[in-house]
Amino acid sequence: MSALAWCLFGLFLLVAGAELIVRAGTRLAALVGIPPILIGLTIVAVGTSTPELAVGINAALQGNGSLAVGNIAGANSLNILFILGLSALLMPLSLEMRTLRFDLPVMTAAALALLAMAWDGVLTRMEGMALVAAGMAYTVAVIHWARRESRAVIAEFSKEYPVPPADGERRKPWPSVLILLAGIAIVVVGADFLVDGAVALARMMGVSDAFIGLTVVAIGTCSPELVTTVVSTLRQERDIAIGNLLGSSVYNRDLCAGSAFRLIL
């Protein structure tokens, strides 16, 4: 199989696996009673960031740090510039004060922190651990905020993600768990194919791994964010769309970059 075919097959598996993760994660959140507002910033954001995480870790294990960071930089640029811009073009997006006061500053701080750590051309294990810890702290903060949300805000999202009765489906989360695990496995396998194909393409074309990561790989791993955000926008679930992009950008810089470089440096 040619290098391009490996890339295309890997991209297909990544998108298919991420779709399973998002669908199963969303359903599981409803089954266990997680507030719907939390889905966009956590479940959906983490699910759509899984391709970047898998590609970053696989690239790091293979010694291709430039591909890992190139993918993360390219993915975040596409998230904020292209995907968010496309969503606003389809339908105006209103931002809550909490987004302006918390999510946007956190996203900016994560970008500046990664830039400062990588300024010397290397990310150490300690810096990788700090990025991962920051990503976990962000998740805890979002969960804490969600618990304080009023019932009126939660009811706004209950039409799309209804919570099942306590004595019914709530006791049967295992199908969603199995689908979620299957999606993760598919994403990991797809990332391996994609990294192998991208490295082969870079060598054949005489360009750097960073260039491939910034273009082909970044566009492919951003496909889940693109599809999820556009669908959420068209369904007028604006907060889920915005939360998905902002959350994904934070997780990409903190969890994905931190996990990848922690393995090789």
Image: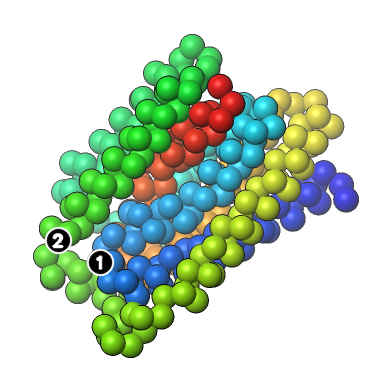
Amino acid under disc 1: Pro
The quarter of the rendered structure image containing the C terminus is: top right
Q: Is residue 186 left or right of residue 181?
A: right
Residue 24, percent across and down?
47, 69
Direction bottom: furthest residue: 168
**What is the number of the mark on residue 35?**
1
Name the element at disc 2. Answer: loop
Direction top: furthest residue: 120
The residue nearer to you, when weighing 65 against 209, is 65
Q: Earlier in the sequence, mark 1 or mark 2?
A: 1
| Image height of 110 relative to 24, above or below | above
- Please name the residue shown 33% across and 80% down the image: 170
Residue 13, percent across and down?
67, 58
Given contact means CB atoms under 8 Å apart, are the residues at marks 1 and 2 in contact? yes
Crowding near the residue tagged with mark 1, few <14, some 14–19, many ≥20 C-alpha atoms within 10 Å: many
Question: Where, by quadrant of the figure, is residue 38 drawn?
Answer: bottom left
Residue 219, percent across and down?
59, 46
- Please name the residue shown 21% across and 72% down the image: 156
Q: Is residue 82 left or right of residue 156?
A: right
| Image height of 186 relative to 166, above or below | above
Which residue lies under the disc numbered 2? 149
